[in-house]
Image (cartoon, rainbow, N blue to C red):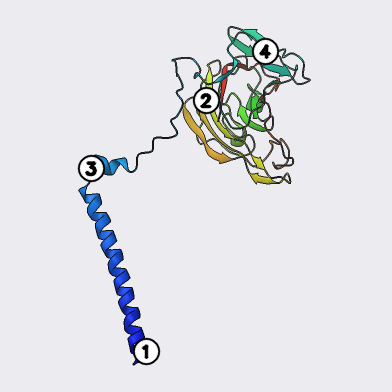
Amino acid sequence: MQNVTHFSLKTLLLVSCGSLMTMACSAETSDEEALEPWQQAQKTEVWEPVPPVVETPKDAPPSDAIVLFDGSDLEEWEADDGGPAHWKLEEDAMTVARREGGIRTKRDFCDIQLHIEWRSPTDIEGMDGQDRGNSGIFLQERYEIQVLDSHENETYPNGQAGSVYKQHIPLVNATRPRGEWQTYDIIYTAPRFDDEDELESPAYVTVLHNGVVVQNHVEIQGKTEWIGAPSYDEAHGCDSLYLQDHDAAVSFRNIWVREL
């Protein structure tokens, strides 16, 4: 008899709790239904943080951009050896001084949005493949987005314009004819390393070539290598952007970054 009584009390308590929960849910549902639609909508409105305002003037960098080259000087750049950058300035553009070496930014960057415009030379007599308008944009001086005259120019696809060199083939070939200005818009997430200098997360990059997505948030597999497989062989922090001298008179203009 005691067991039966105990069971009945337990059951009664469970039923009572269930009933209370049902009543609470019913009350909540009833309250919700009593609200006007605009009051219900307010419950999912988030008012903070408020995004800062960025001005986006036509044919000019965003107001929060760091302008690295506007055609006037090379003050934001230095040579391989750390001295002044010796590339040629002409018509609001800078052109590779062949065999003088690449140039790097004086500032260091990690996660960025990068805008850069480039133009391959028109003098291509006797040149094809990788010898035609070759240069490169190295993120953190290590990870290369290839610059190449890839208009009607056969080469290995993971080395053509818009490739993550020797790592990712571009989705399409969006290259304009030589002599015309090309645009890269690059969204880059730098790699992270832990306290023991081990890789925590790799780098990722998205590339738009002339407004067309050619790399869609692809994983960078490590430092760019001409021979052998890429790897993250060293931990590092923020570092320079580097433009390559590959013995071709490639020109660049309108370079700016936004730190993310």
User: How far is disc 3 from disc 4 in space, using C-alphas?
Assistant: 57 Å
Mark 3: amino acid = Pro
Q: Earlier in the sequence, mark 2 or mark 1?
A: 1
Q: Earlier in the sequence, mark 4 or mark 1?
A: 1
Left or right of residue 175: residue 155: right
Mark 2: amino acid = Thr
Q: Earlier in the sequence, mark 3 or mark 2?
A: 3
Disc 2 residue crowd, few under 14, some 14–19, many 20+, Cα 10 Å: many
Mark 4: amino acid = Glu
Q: Is residue 117 visible?
A: no
Q: Earlier in the sequence, mark 1 or mark 3?
A: 1
Residue on which the image places disc 3: 37
Please identify the quadrant where the C terminus is shown.
Answer: top right
Q: Are marks 2 and 1 in contact (CB under 8 Å)?
A: no
Q: Looking at the image, how many numbered discs can be counted on the residues?
A: 4
Q: Earlier in the sequence, mark 4 or mark 2?
A: 4
Between disc 2 and disc 1, the foreground one is 1
Residue on which the image places disc 1: 3
Residue 138 coordinates in the image, percent (x, y): 65, 28
Residue on which the image places disc 2: 175
Q: Secondary structure at mark 3?
A: helix
User: How far is disc 4 from disc 1 in space, using C-alphas?
Assistant: 90 Å
Residue 28 coordinates in the image, percent (x, y): 27, 55
Q: Secondary structure at mark 2?
A: loop
User: At 63% across and 22% down in the image, what residue appears?
Assistant: 132
Residue 91 coordinates in the image, percent (x, y): 58, 6
**Which label number is shown at residue 208?**
none
